[in-house]
Image (cartoon, grey):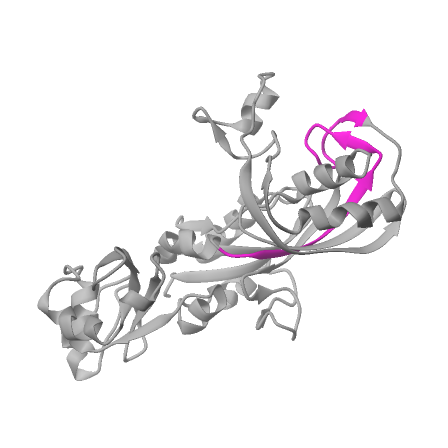
Amino acid sequence: MDRNGYVLLDKSVGETSFAALDRVKKALDTKKVGHTGTLDKFASGLLIALVGRATKLAPWFSNCNKRYEGIIKFGEETNTLDIEGVVIAQAPVPTKEAILEVLPRFRGAFMQTPPVYSAIHVKGARASALARGGKMVEMQERPVFIHELELVDYEPPFAAIRVFCSKGTYIRSLARDIALSAGSRGHLFALRRIQIARYGMSKGGETGFWVSDAVSAKEDIVGALRPIDRAAFDAIGLPVLEAPDAVALALSQGKKPTSFEFRDFFRNFPVEDWNFDAVMGVFHQGGGFIGIIEKIGEKGNLWRYGYVYGKLSENCGKGTATSNA
């Protein structure tokens, strides 16, 4: 069995992301399983588990927008900014009009302070571990971008929201900041991640892919393992190049992108027109995934390897290209 690829999981409330990944490890009998962004224990929804050689693709799978549905409880702020913490501040519950008035402040680009109880490392240790140890932790602001923010329903003190945001956005912090801006206090009462890149939790619409039910039984996980193919790159929004035999073989062997096999190949792609941080997935014309290359330098055919996924057999020129397991 080829244990390389990814699994789309629907994590349940009360399950840690680590436990969800552990189910994948046991089902596929492998220790090489990684994630593309954890979910808090109280949250549910889409979790992408990378398996085998695909674990090295985490930086590209993680660098994607995400969509959430959440519920903010106004009137009380907790130390963890969610339902698992203890109340540290209280304030009057705001009106619907007050909430609608402040929402525009949180659309677009702005600086956000992450929760103290988070996996972010501060001076070599997780902020959450330092906080639980009684130490004062100062969290640094970081840039985030919220594409869409909508108030779906409001039955005081509970507000249902939908959020479409950049990587690194903390919905717990968003709940805190919306409440403060509305003259109240608040924490995240519930959260469900419904989309990562173009992988979504429902049929149809703009997601392109969907997950119908939680994948939990061993036979379900085994059957749910997907290969790293062109559809995966389309889902995460990265362009794809097809490499002929000689180029594909040279790439899979890690030869320098300046070697002769690549000269004519790269000459066909005007990299001066690409963004500075251009990234592309390279596939053999026979269909197999070779790896990722990245452009460096603003001009000229200057490339480096992002990751080489697997080697091709020497006889790929005869049309029998295969990746090593």
Question: In the picture, which quadrant includes the C terminus?
Answer: bottom left
> Quadrant of the rendered structure where residue 73 is?
top right
Task: Classify 313 as above or below 61.
Answer: below
Would you say 92 lies left or right of 265 here? right
Question: In the picture, which quadrant includes the N terminus?
Answer: bottom left
| Residue 293: % across, % down | 28, 61
Q: Residue furthest left?
A: 260
Would you say 295 lies left or right of 210 here? left
| Residue 295: % across, % down | 28, 59
Task: Classify 283 as above or below 305.
Answer: below
> Quadrant of the rendered structure where residue 170 is?
top right
Residue at screen point 35% across, 61% down:
279
Does residue 200 appear in the picture of this structure?
yes
Which of the two residues, 151 or 81, is positioned nearer the viewer here?
151
Magenta run includes residue 87: yes
Would you say 116 lies left or right of 123 here? right
> Quadrant of the rendered structure where residue 312 is?
bottom left
